[in-house]
Image (spheres, rainbow, N blue to C red):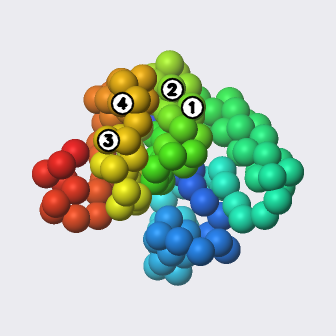
Amino acid sequence: MAARDPSHIVMLGTDPRTHGGISTVIRGWRAAGLFERWPVDYVVTHREGTRRQKLATAWQAALACLDLAWRHGRGVLHVHAASRWSFWRKGAYMMVAYLAGWPVVFHLHGGGFARFLHESGPFTRRIARFLLDRATAIVVLSERWAAWI
């Protein structure tokens, strides 16, 4: 059974040097020593900057994730996500993790996620349901969100 146990955590999210909730959480966890105590590789999937810089960051993240999956074989994918493009970026990684048999922790930060889904078409809602139904765990930031999710 040990060969199937996840041995590594690949965490995806926004560059900690940016503004916002995800980067604030990551900075706090880093300051508290989480990344030294656990086998976590934090992969930046988004950053502030020009469109070219954002695309370069996304490309580097994809390559980093492939490298980590190759080196560690079994792992856990922990995604920090919000609405709109954040959800779509993380959704692509979640699909790959599901195909690879990795458990996924979906950490929802966006207070507008319910509105995002409500205002989206049926295709987006189906994709969201598909991805979230398969998550091993969903982390939310309030009791109200927990009841909604």
Residue at image position (35%, 61%) is 111
Relative placement, left or right, of 135 versus 145 is: right
Q: Spatial distance from mark 4 to mark 3, Cα to Cα?
A: 8 Å
Q: Residues within 10 Å of mark 1 (few under 14, many from 20)?
A: few
Whole-percent x, y for residue 1 in the image: 35, 25
Is mark 1 in CB contact (under 8 Å) with mark 3?
no
Sequence-earlier tag: 2 or 4: 2
Is mark 2 in CB contact (under 8 Å) with mark 3?
no
* Comparing labels 2 and 3, the label whose residue is closer to the camera: 3
Could you tell me the amino acid type at mark 3? His
Could you tell me the amino acid type at mark 2? Met
Q: Spatial distance from mark 1 to mark 2, Cα to Cα?
A: 5 Å
Is mark 1 in CB contact (under 8 Å) with mark 2?
yes
* Comparing labels 1 and 3, the label whose residue is closer to the camera: 3
The residue wearing badge 4 is 125
Q: Residues within 10 Å of mark 4 (few under 14, many from 20)?
A: some
